[in-house]
Image: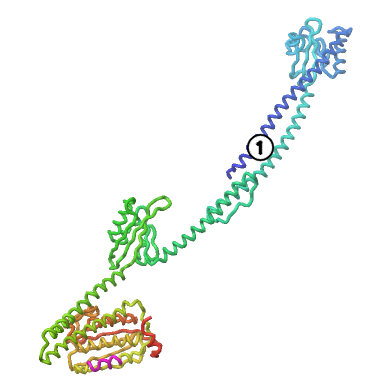
Amino acid sequence: MPKTSLHMKILLWGWAILLCTLLLTFWFYYGTVSEELTASGRQNTSRLLNYVRWEISHSPVRPGTPQFQNEIKELGSHLDIRITYIKNGKVLADSGVAAERLSQLDDHSNRPEVIAAEAAGTGKNIRYSKTLQTRMLYVAQVMDTQGEFLRLAMPYSVIGERLDKIMLHFTVMLALLAIGSAILLIFVGKRTTSAVKEVSATAQAIGEGDYGKRIRVIPGGEYKLMAESINSMAKKIQGHIRIIEDQRNQLDAMFENMTEGIMVLDPQGKIESVNKSMTELIPDTQNFIGRVPLEVLTRHEIQDSVDKIIKHDSEKDSGSLIVDLADGRSMNITICSYKDYKARRKLILVFHDISEVRRVEKVLRDFVSNASHQLRTPLTSIKGYSETLIDNPPQDRKVLVGFLGTILDNANHMSKVITGMFALARSEYSGKKLRTRPTDLQKCIGLSMTNLRSLAENKNITISHGQIPQVNVTGTNEGLVQIFDNLIENAIKYAPGDTKVNIQAEIDAGYAVIKVVDQGPGIAAADKERIFERFFKLDENAVGHGSSGLGLALCRSLARNFNGDIWVESPVDAATGTGSSFCVKLPVTAEQASESEQDSQQGDYI
């Protein structure tokens, strides 16, 4: 059953009060009219009583005779009233009773009107008459003779009929007023309820986010202020929500598109949310929502910093630390706090991956250390021989030429080291991307063989090659020639005299695999990866061989820039444990090589 609205309750109470007021008015009016009609009837009866008394007193007929009964009966019929003559309680005459029944009537001395008349001279009473079987108005008066009373009675129904008409008219009027007021109240109630429902619906719509909703129907002035207030509130909220949504969208865009990982912690220090970059840095982070950072990061330093900020919020509200994760990455973590709408302290952890920066710093430190080490030995040698030549120049020309040759060799070695460092730095740390293009593989291998033929002839080493496929590979002329120059030069340096350096090439799964095979002493398994590190040399007598320790590192850097790779297979001859095969894998392209002058002028880097 639907619950009655407040307005309907008020209207129903008003309707009930109206009906009660009308009923009370009718009750008062009805009582007053009833009293007035009764008093009027009594007055009329008293006048008739005086008239009948006068008639009886002047009549020659004496009470108690049949003639008196006839006279009383005739007079009652003429006046349309009942006349009773009583003496000492006995009815001597009655206009409403036959003469033969007079003796059967009860003693009337105990009638209220007779008793009142005996006491005061006149008595009145309204009661039901068993004789006439109706309500009657009785008026009695003492006659001149003691113990004799004259009583008149007239039907009370005359007054009752008038009161019944009044009752009927008022009932009809009350019913019409009740129906009319009910219809009016229902109409007003529905209109008011409709207005209240619209106000409620508008407020609910605003609460659910429809800030463009407005109140259109205003049933009365008392609702105008409320409607205007709600409409004004909705307009202001709409403006505020737009600003909040714009700011939220901006924050969401920044939050989700930042390269730094963001982790938000709740007041208990548990993970509340993370952004996309955080899940990329640590893929399992999303699965640890609602848990402490230690469980996903496994670094107690982070958890300690978080706990310290949460417990000592008045002393410290931010922090920063650098940690190394288990996978080798380095993170610079900034911790800052803020308070939510409930004034609860929450934390934001910003993870910045500085692995590359740390790696570059380490490489730089190693580079400077290795470079200083590589340059210190030849520089010391140059300084020593130069000082000897200045302080005590040898007289023998051969000794002088030997000193100068040593100085030149060390200077060449230093030049080669510096040139290699610049080439490697340009390949790895220039911040530029190599502009690769289809490059003729046969041409690049041929140029390298030509460049190193004289060096090979000095050791009586033969450079040979098998069938080189006529294909284009991804790279640059300069880069590929530099790779093959380094590999062939190393093969010539470490191979014994009167041997061969063989170059092989084949196509495998879209890649060209080139092998430079020598008959040198081979490379130990522990050194197969280390030989591609910067400044690593198998032969400690670097100056003697003119090695800078950067050639193979440069080859690996260039090969990987060309989306390829390089590795070594050693030994080649398992029986003797000798020979090395340096393998280079480069992607084969379907495009034709372009060696125009314009491409050469543009260079290999963009």
List x then y, in percent, for residue 450.
28, 93
Quick one: quadrant of the N terminus? top right
**Up-down relation of residue 273 to residue 558 (above or below):** above
Looking at the picture, tell me which residue is in the foreground, 247 or 4.
247
Nearer to us in this view, 142 or 308:
308
Residue 110 forms part of the magenta stretch: no
Residue 556: name its quadrant.
bottom left
- Which residue shows up at 11% across the image and 88% down it? 394
Report the residue that reaches farthest toward the right. Answer: 60
- Which type of secondary structure does the marked residue at label 1 adopt? helix
**Which residue lies at the image location 12% right of the left edge and 92% below the top edge?**
398
Q: Nearer the viewer, residue 229 or 48?
A: 229
Q: Is residue 234 left or right of residue 220?
A: left
The answer to whether residue 171 is above or below residue 426 is above
> Is residue 71 at least partly visible in the picture?
yes
Q: Quadrant of residue 475?
A: bottom left
Residue 374 image position (x, y, % from top left): 20, 79
Question: Which residue range is magenta in the image?
Answer: 447-455
For the view shown, which residue lies furthest in the front direction? 391
Residue 265 spot, x, y in % from top left: 36, 56
Name which residue lies at 11% across and 85% down: 392
Magenta-drawn stretch contains 450: yes
Measured as percent of width and height from the top left, residue 536 is found at 21, 79
Residue 254 image-quadrant placement: bottom left
319, 46: nearer the viewer: 319
The residue singled out by tag 1 in the image is 15
